[in-house]
Amino acid sequence: MFASRPTDNKARMAIVAFILFTLPGLAAAQSALIRVGGGSEHSMEVPLYKSRIVVLAESAARVAVGNPDIADILILRSTQIYVLGKDLGTTNVLLWDKNDDLIGTLNIEVTHDLQSLKEKLYRLLPDQKIEVYSAQRNIVLAGQVSNVTDMNAALRIARGYFTQIASAVQAETFELAEGVSQREDKSVGEVINLMSIGGVQQVMLEVKVAEISRTELKRLDVRFNSILQGNNKWKWGGVNGGATFPDAPSGIPVFNNPAPFGPVIDEFAPNDLFIRDKGFFASFLSDNALFNLAFDAAKENGLAKILAEPTLVTQSGHEAQFLSGGEFPIPVPQGLQGTTIEFKEFGVGIKFLPIVLASGRISIKLSITVSELSIDNSVIINSNNGASTFLIPSLTKRSAESTVELADGQTIGIAGLINENLREVITKFPGLGSIPLLGALFRSQEFRKGETELLILVTPHLAKPLTPGQIRLPTDDFVDPGDFGWYLSGQMVGGG
């Protein structure tokens, strides 16, 4: 117990003088004054850093405070006591008269300023029914709110009340005569959230990924080789497509040349002529001339369409993921420990985090990826002993990340792409390839053009559960074909 002493320092006297000067205003501010007398026991709550006035039935000569760290007590005009809340917690105060008879006991609980917090919540969030309680050093918020935004706002407002406590835990509002704090734990508490969100909080996201890819190819690849014997001393020819000139065994003539030493060019070995898909070829052979010609001509138009419409449902404030595609293996060398396999995902992937706001609006943080396998830029890996070969395809990937806010049922395009690429290559025989008309026989040319259009649309909905009778499955109308339809008519689906 702590007993007040008649010797107060100057700061204490200054505070007393200030309180005495403003006492009429303080007393008028109290909704009800507590009156103590006759040895009775009373309980009272005091907001933190606020004060209350206690009226005594007779003059007090001595006061004892259980924990001066919780509340500070000052005697005013001998029949009034000024109680100031200094820290969260409980304590009691005993009062005696000049005859050492007990006047009464006060049980004091210092709580957060809940009334001020309630007023701020009502003023800033008038449409929400939020209940506020104090539990030891914590503030408890309960009730039902309509959206996550207002819930977070209420929590931030309540946490602001701890800022003042945290800045004052090391300071004493009034310097007591003993001057020693008995509470070592200076924690400021926390906000306990018991609020619930009412209404529809399931969000269904509809995504449409539409892509059109057009390709155009024009190719004219001319390859030829020729060799001509003019006389016993000269051999000449030309090639478009590569050739080699290996040494042949001595005495084997070219074009049945009976020369004893053979020609200077023992053997002429041109590369193989080939036609990848469409074209025509010609060949001429005589006693002293050989000519081969191959035209590889092509004109191709390609069209590819991708349309994906994934739909995903999750609760407000929780992330959901969706992948429609697959995985392909990638060998990863591990040194002397061999090789392990890792898998890389591809396809249409979605990640989104919805938050239901006020007035039915939905904030969505989403990430959408569209990828497909491609043989372009692929990698070939051979094993150490050459017994196996791994072909690792590349990925063509389009992705978008965004945060949007929409009302229920509204649609917005979050990504669009129009891509056009053009490539033209001409390879020609020097000089001969530039001759008009005839030069087409001595050159190869290729023209490639590609166009891609991509659009990604998203539509959020506030989802509600359905009864089983309202759900239709893709397999509901499927009927197994009978033997007659399967074997004789080739039917894959039976009649309804």
Image: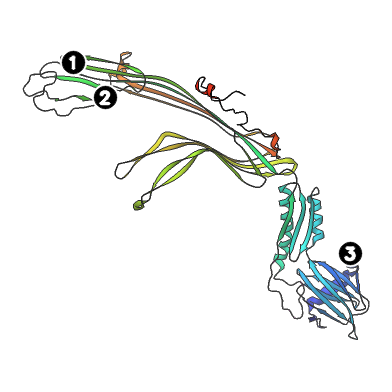
Q: What predominant SS class does the magenta segment belong to?
A: loop
For residue 312, side relative to residue 244 (left or right): right
Residues drawn in magenta: 172-188
Q: Amino acid at mark 3?
A: Ala
Q: Residues within 10 Å of mark 1 (few under 14, many from 20)?
A: some
Residues tagged 3 and 1 counted as in contact (Cβ below 8 A): no
- Residue at 25 percent across and 15 percent down: it is 283
**Disc 3 to disc 2, C-alpha distance:** 107 Å
Residues tagged 2 and 1 counted as in contact (Cβ below 8 A): no
Quarter-of-image position of residue 315: top right
Instruction: Please tell me the numbered disc located at residue 272.
Output: 2
**Disc 2 to disc 1, C-alpha distance:** 18 Å
Element type where label 1 sits in the image: strand
Element type where label 3 sits in the image: helix
Say whether residue 307 is visible.
yes
Q: Position of residue 300 (x, y in %)?
A: 43, 21
Q: Spot the residue most to the bottom.
A: 99
Q: Amino acid at mark 2?
A: Asp
Which of the marked residues, 2 or 1, is nearer the chain's N terminus?
A: 2
Say whether residue 14 is visible.
no
Residue that carries the numbered disc 3 in the rendered image: 29
**Quadrant in which the C terminus appears:** top right
Which label sits in the foreground, 3 or 1?
1
Instruction: Please tell me the numbered disc located at residue 289.
Output: 1
Q: Amino acid at mark 1?
A: Ala
Q: Position of residue 142 (x, y in %)?
A: 76, 55
Q: Spot the residue most to the left.
A: 260
